[in-house]
Image: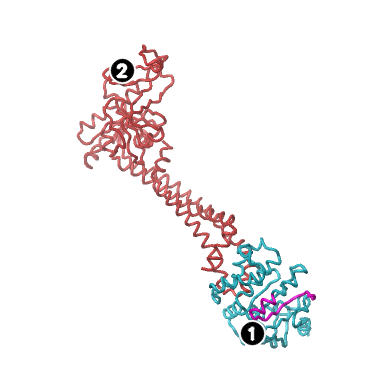
Chain colours: A red, B cyan
Amino acid sequence: MNALYLAYAYLRFHWARSLVLVVVAALILFVPVATQILLSTSQTALVARGETTPLLLGSRGSQLDLTMAALYFSDERPAPIAMQEVETLWDSGLAIPIPVHTAFSSGGFRIVGTTLDYFDFRDLDFSEGRGLSLLGDAVIGADVAQQLGKRVGDSLVSSPENLFDLDGVYPLEMPIVGVLAPTNTPDDQAIFVDIKTAWVIQGIGHGHEDVVTAADIATGTDALANAAVVQFQRITPENIESFHFHGSQNSFPATAVIVVPNDQRSGTILRGRYLDSENPSQLIEPAGVIQGLVDRIFRIKSLLDGVTAIIAIAAIAAVGLAVFLSYRLRAREIATAVKLGARRGMVLRLLAAETVTLLFLSGCIAAVGAALISRNAETWVGWLLSLGA
Amino acid sequence: MISVENVSFEYGEGGFRLHIPHLSLRERERLAIVGPSGSGKTTLLNLIAGILLPKSGRIDIDGTDVTGLSDAERRQFRASHIGFVFQDFALLDYLSARQNILYPYRITPALKLDADARSRAEALADACGIGDKLDRHPAALSQGEQQRVAICRALVTQPKLILSDEATGNLDPESKGRILDLLFQQAADVGATVLAVTHDHELLPRFERVIDFAQYREVAAA
């Protein structure tokens, strides 16, 4: 206890030096642990999303782009697949196909056109409002609601995709009818609409009494359609009947189709049907694609581990030197203690108590930091992963 | 009280050599040792304290042959029987005056820090005129005050022997006499013998006896 008392008194008196040593030692302990927690959580989150999506159908091309676009709603734009493929899957009776169309965005968040099966498949709950029921309805993820400050009753306007779009494809105003409970997955960062609504945004479907002009907004009165003043489309109970689609729905696009086979045998049969490399569509297992990505990340991580180890050794050596120099500075005190009759182990005990106290404080700080990281890892990883989307 | 008989000591082969045929101190005696630098005055204090071991001879303190004790026993004996006062005070900058006085209790199991020790420290500090400065660190004390703290530290364990190594060497002429008188007075209160090394001949009349250490150097030279 006396050694600890003296160590504490010394550290407190030289608080600036102690603080630097404690912070440096805490960082040496904290950084590798925090990195490990975040990477491990990232791996879990990435792989979990892949593993909960049995099969994915899309145009032949980069499997990673297809997976990232369909599962993580990233900015990748794989070539769209025709809705005919969805019908073919329904007709096979082997699986439930869930189309996702992720070509548009609003307020920096991806608009995901899909069907109601998606909400059941991902087991999504509502914290507010209801699900999609009408053309134009939007259900937003928890992060979208928080970051845009939106709730049920507000509306969103899709971002114009092309400034020079001469087809007259105007942004669509969508009423928010539901807010999803947080899931710490990319679903928190998405705006869900019916896939038909996505087609309306794309200009495939449209109404004929639907234009809202600047004058309408300013005065509340109707005006004739004029492309020069049109702000956005709005689907209302009055004009919803006038919305229609030109052409066959089978040719309409989807970014990908999530395929949920009835059983393992059905999945195997379906995979066999898409093995032909001449087939313009491909059926992939997202889990395998994600695992490949994770393996690549972790190969890079092993390199980072090496760099971290070298930096840690250098930092430990620096701390060791600081402690050693501190001991040298205290040589006079040690000589005094010996003259006054300090027992043989006392000097070592005194110095060890100081080192242990420093390490204990550093360890506590690192442990608190690690606990904080661990507690919020899923949220932060979800946010980090969404940055790359 | 102290008896040094036929003690020889040398630092390595052919280096400094010291031989003391006989030296004794009575209980409560105040003895000054003077002599030129390098004559072995501090070495004698270290031999008596058991910090150094003589090559031959016997050092007896209050009935205990210090040279016959093991290292651990000598440390314990030193902590419980001897008080040290140094020229540079040897106070610890990170401890308050109070904790500096109690420092011996923190470094050895031979002494037990209890309420008596704490109240003794306060009483000593009051007697030395630093009772109101016990919570200050050494940097906030004058040289004289620092030496008073060092005297309190030497006396708080109620030692039988005070070894003073140039205790007034760093003080101004006015403070020297006062501090030495204080040391004598406090040592007398606890019944301690004082063996002091000094260069200051003005202070010698305050001692009961003075030994010129040059005689032992001559013996060594012979």
Dot 2: what SS?
loop
The kind of residue tagged 2 is: Gly
Residue denoted by label 1 = B61
x and y, in percent, of residue A347 in the image: 57, 70
Q: Amino acid at mark 1?
A: Ile
Asked if the residue under mark 2 is in contact with the one under mark 1, i.e. CB atoms within 8 Å, the reply is: no
Q: Quadrant of residue B194?
A: bottom right
Quadrant where the image shows the C terminus of chain A: top left
Residue at 51% of width from left, 52% of height from top? A27
Residue B192 part of the magenta-drawn span: yes
> Residue A263's mark?
none
Left-right relation of A131 to A9: left
Badge 1 sits on which subunit?
A: B
Residue A266 x, y percent position in the rendering: 22, 39
* Foreground residue among B181 and A288: B181
Mark nearer the viewer, 1 or 2: 1
Asked whether, in this view, residue A273 is left or right of residue B114, the answer is left
Q: Nearer the viewer, residue A288 or A170?
A: A170
**Residues in magenta?**
B183-202
Looking at this view, name the residue that lies furthest to the top: A224
Mark 2, residues whose alpha carbon is within 10 Å: few (<14), some, or many (≥20)?
some
Q: Going 39% across and 36% down the picture, which residue do you hit? A: A146
Q: Is residue A212 above or below residue A137?
A: above
Indicate the chain on which mark 2 is placed.
A
Of residues A75 and B28, the one drawn nearer to the viewer in this rendering: B28
Q: Name the element at disc 1.
A: strand
Tell me the quarter of the picture where residue B58 sits: bottom right
Report which residue position mark 2 lands on: A207
Q: CA distance from mark 1 to mark 2?
A: 113 Å
Does the magenta portion include A206? no
Q: Name the residue nearer the viewer: A61 or B52.
A: B52
